[in-house]
Image (cartoon, coloured by chain):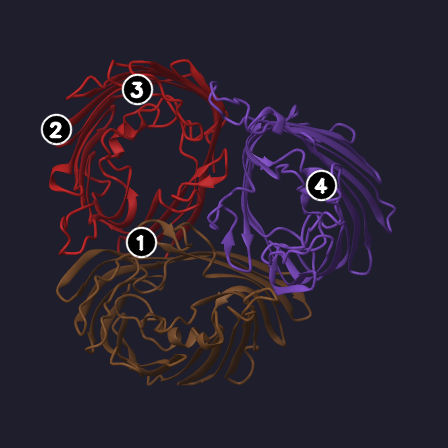
Chain colours: A brown, B purple, C red
Amino acid sequence: AQSSLTLFGVLDVGIARVDGSGVRRTGLSTGGANISRLGFRGVEDLGGGLSAGFWLEAGLDVDTGLGKSASGALAFNRRSTASLSGGFGELRLGRDDAATFLNTLIFDPFLTNGVGGNNAFIMLGAPIQQSNAISYLTPPSLGGFYGQLQVAPGEQPSTAPNRHEGDYAGLRAGYRSGALHVAAAWGRLHGATSDTELKIANAGVSWDFGFVRPSLLWAREERAAARMTAIELGATAPIGPGELRAQASRYDRADSNADWTKFAIGYGYNLSKRTQLYATVAHLHNSDGAQRSIGVQGLPATGTSLGGSSNGYEMGIRHAF
Amino acid sequence: AQSSLTLFGVLDVGIARVDGSGVRRTGLSTGGANISRLGFRGVEDLGGGLSAGFWLEAGLDVDTGLGKSASGALAFNRRSTASLSGGFGELRLGRDDAATFLNTLIFDPFLTNGVGGNNAFIMLGAPIQQSNAISYLTPPSLGGFYGQLQVAPGEQPSTAPNRHEGDYAGLRAGYRSGALHVAAAWGRLHGATSDTELKIANAGVSWDFGFVRPSLLWAREERAAARMTAIELGATAPIGPGELRAQASRYDRADSNADWTKFAIGYGYNLSKRTQLYATVAHLHNSDGAQRSIGVQGLPATGTSLGGSSNGYEMGIRHAF
Amino acid sequence: AQSSLTLFGVLDVGIARVDGSGVRRTGLSTGGANISRLGFRGVEDLGGGLSAGFWLEAGLDVDTGLGKSASGALAFNRRSTASLSGGFGELRLGRDDAATFLNTLIFDPFLTNGVGGNNAFIMLGAPIQQSNAISYLTPPSLGGFYGQLQVAPGEQPSTAPNRHEGDYAGLRAGYRSGALHVAAAWGRLHGATSDTELKIANAGVSWDFGFVRPSLLWAREERAAARMTAIELGATAPIGPGELRAQASRYDRADSNADWTKFAIGYGYNLSKRTQLYATVAHLHNSDGAQRSIGVQGLPATGTSLGGSSNGYEMGIRHAF
């Protein structure tokens, strides 16, 4: 049976400045265009249309050489899955991107990364990756339709005060054909008590006109009385040997004026298919009740005053292998 | 000179339920049939019958993407050795399986793993892997006889109150020919005071009748007045495109009635040489003085009451590369 | 475009004894001839004389299987860089050897390692590796001249009490042609207050007579009133299928008699280009105010009394792949 074993990765490192209310921080950043990573993946043809696959992927901080585990060392906590695939689709077990995270990446021109990205719309705690995940993914042959159902048990004992603590379920569905791509996702993460259950919903749409691909992304997270809604208008446009990326986004907290607005524009210049130089500038403005400031991987945000504003500047190199 | 460099690994992940005295826990498990791992190994032919080799092997938790170091990140603490091999055998330096551990793996139909395994007979603290190990292993050409002598200094200063603390020594000897495999091991691990010295002994035998391979494994650990003895009767049988695995084992604490009995049966269905689906069920019954319960990697035991019983159910996929 | 992807590493493990004032410690050491490591590196030809490259390198302790992150797990904190190279030289971003460290390795017959090495002349805290480093390196075609300029921001906020804390800058320049190699380096590391700024300087020279290559290395570190100077006279000589290595070094603390002297001699026997057996002995003598003792990776120093002496003995295998 045919099989493949692939070593892959991304090293993305840049020079960045972030500021907030006049306080600046300058240094090396990492993952400004794509998360730096090292991975191993493979596929084994089992015959009869079936295949088995595995995927191990560790995040990296190129500026320090550290990994992304809690201790700062390497772990495959970006993705660690084994799969069975066939005409029925794919059954995948392990740690993986949360189904509710993926749209916030796909419909952001900055892929959630760097000073310009939407930071995965982490608003009230929606997961980016999810441990203990069991996923069913549709096969690629559904005329443009695709979907994913994902459940991840919190593994509480059956007699725990809140036996569903940590249980996650997510559903993602989309349609991609020709110039159109549209998708939506819904999910729930059970908290420590029933009133801390987090409800997650998002939807995105993009249309590729050729010279520009505009996108619209909406996301909401709710927990008890707290509700945050984000909306991002984005565009990517092929210009010369690269791509212009821009976004404007608004984050609205329903029960307060802890809201903010972010604008970003950047350009990625392709030295090759694998290597890109990029530069991005971003501006964030807080409403009176908010004090969000721009930070990136490898260069923490400075913080800002209530109602203050924050800027980010980043130029770097993204090299894939 | 010819040489090889091999990237290898196992991703083993499943869905499991464990219970104890009626309390259940359900979720993803890892390593149910084989420990999940990622490794690098190589051999260099030095000429004249000599070769040099290295082996780096890290354990993985596929359900979380974490590794097996104390902090949860990756480390090659399953095995990290450099070797010189020749007609004389092999001299191996580094961290390696403890010589006294190996029989508890070889003669267990479940290879110590999952809900069905013997959990390496960890009773009073015998090591599974051992750091700072110096091993001599016999060459493969001794007419079926093989042996390993392993010493590992505890690296205490010569003036320490107990200068032998942590010193380990192990000896393993076996004979494998035709249908017969028999082996025994003895070892000592010096504790913090002389009366905490741990004495380890075990022996196993199996006979391959073709349609079934029964095995018997006996193990004892002693420290001061404490003495635990375990005995495991196992069998593997090729049935269809896979293997039936079963074991019954008894753990006896000499100085109390903290004893327990375990039964397990499972089947591994081979999708290919590299990929297996498996399912295992296990039952554990405690004597009045014991409260052991079944847990697996990635899904902790629930605990049980004194004299209670515990069950484990697991189905998963084991994919090797 | 042509490109390469290389998996590389070193496993170096030995048996060592270190002592101080009569207290001995015996066990397994690692990195006695070269630091044990695992790495991934690659180069992509971008055309027009340009190339992109990456380098990820993790240190290993073969005796325990652990890595070199703070938690003992694996991290690429030996080197983690992305580069653009061309006729202009190389621009390199990420974590890398400190420019001021490299001479202490190049001009030490023991490459800073094992019982015999100069321990990188870590005297008052000069860095070995440096995070957040931006380096320019000259191209290889300057008639034997080479140089490196390296800056690494400490990434303090602009309003921090000491906003330059952690800032590092280093310059290295050398000339290598025929039998001659000469190089010098200067650097500064800003401490928490201005009077804790560390000034680093070193210089080395070697001449290869063919049958022996003598070397001289001088290094100084200064912080406020503290000043340490080290001088090392070294030699390597090809003898038979290997290399003799020897050094004598003196460490002088300007403001006290906390000085010491070290002597070491060793031989590395090449089994192949990739595999070497080695043995080293070393002796260290303290002045009345010092209590330095020899320790190695994997086997900590025992300590010694004020004015006492210390010895180190090590034999091992270094295997590269």
The relative height of residue C318 versus residue B231 in the rendered view (above or below) is above
The residue to which callout 3 is attached is: C291
Q: Is residue B5 visible?
A: no
Tell me what residue is drawn at x 40 percent, y 27 percent. Answer: C296
Amino acid marked by disc 1: Ala
Q: Is residue B184 visible?
A: yes
Label 4 resides on the chain identified as B
Label 3 resides on the chain identified as C
Q: Secondary structure at mark 3?
A: loop
Q: CA distance from mark 3 to mark 1?
A: 48 Å
Q: Tell me if mark 3 has few (under 14), some (14-19) or many (20+) residues whose alpha carbon lies within 10 angstroms of its own.
A: many
Frontmost residue, B261 versus A152 = B261
Q: Is there CB contact under 8 Å for labels 4 and 2?
A: no
**Sequence-wise first label, 3 or 1:** 1
Label 2 resides on the chain identified as C
Amino acid marked by disc 4: Thr
Q: Position of residue A67 (x, y in %)?
A: 39, 52
Report whether mark 2 lies on the same chain as mark 1.
yes
The residue to which callout 2 is attached is: C225
Q: CA distance from mark 2 to mark 3?
A: 20 Å
Q: Tell me if mark 4 has few (under 14), some (14-19) or many (20+) residues whose alpha carbon lies within 10 angstroms of its own.
A: many
Mark sitting on residue C52: 1
Q: CA distance from mark 4 to mark 2?
A: 62 Å
Q: Nearer the viewer, mark 4 or mark 1?
A: 4
Q: Is there CB contact under 8 Å for labels 2 and 1?
A: no
Q: Is there CB contact under 8 Å for labels 3 and 1?
A: no
Horizontal side of A269 relative to C27 (left or right) equals left
Label 1 resides on the chain identified as C
Frontmost residue, B256 versus B24 = B256
The relative height of residue C165 versus residue A211 in the rendered view (above or below) is above
The residue to which callout 4 is attached is: B104
